[in-house]
Image (tube, rainbow, N blue to C red):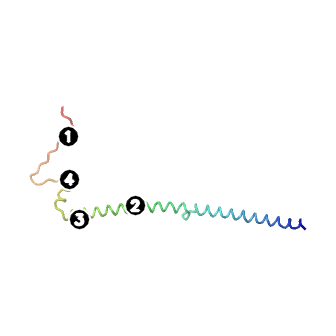
Amino acid sequence: MNTVKRKKQEPIRHEKRKIVYLGVVIAVFLLIWILFAPERGYIQYRKLQKEITAMNLEVDRLEAKNIELAEEIKRLRSDDDYLEDIARKRHNLLKKNETVFEFDSGRARR
């Protein structure tokens, strides 16, 4: 009677091992799929998160630049002294009867 039970238990154990092995293979496959799935995997997710962070930083920088430019436009429209200063510096404009003297400071005298 003892030998009959052993013979029946061996195929059951063998089947259980196959099921466990199959479960492990499926779990490994799912883990690999979760990590590397094209356009859906965790690695792709992390890459997109980095891109979003970089874009948010760029948006913040551009918003700050936009505010700065809006303030400059406001000054150019309302502050005549600032407008004159910009015209002189950027476009080399002069007032009436004004003369500019340029000195070559790069050369040493001998």
Q: Which residue is at 75% across, 64% downward?
A: 18
Kindly give the residue lying farthest to the left in the view shown.
97
Q: Nearer the viewer, mark 4 or mark 2?
A: 2
Q: Quick one: label 4 or label 2, which is nearer the N terminus?
A: 2
Q: Residue farthest to the right? A: 1
Circles 4, 3 touching at the beta carbon (< 8 Å): no
Amino acid marked by disc 4: Lys
110 left or right of 39 in image: left
The picture places residue 81, in percent across and down from the top left corner, at 16, 59
Instruction: Report the disc number at residue 57.
Output: 2
Q: CA distance from mark 1 to mark 3?
A: 37 Å
In front: label 1 or label 2: 2
Quadrant, the C terminus = top left
Residue 55 placement: quadrant: bottom left
Circle 2 residues within 10 Å: few <14, some 14–19, many ≥20: few
Distance in Å between CA atoms under marks 1 and 2? 43 Å
The numbered mark at residue 105 is 1
Disc assigned to residue 89: 4
Cα distance in 3D space between marks 4 and 2: 32 Å
- Tag 1: residue type? Ser
Residue 41 x/y as whole percent: 56, 63
Q: Residue at x 67, y 64 (%)?
A: 26
User: Local crowd at mark 1 within 10 Å, few (<14), some, or many (≥20)?
Assistant: few
Where residue 101 appears, x then y in whole percent? 14, 45
At a point 28% along the width and 62% down the height, the residue shown is 69
Q: CA distance from mark 4 to mark 3?
A: 19 Å
Quadrant of the rendered structure where residue 85 is? Answer: bottom left
The answer to which of marks 1 and 4 sits earlier in the sequence is 4
Residue holding disc 3: 74
As shown in the figure, which amino acid type bears the numbered disc 3? Answer: Lys
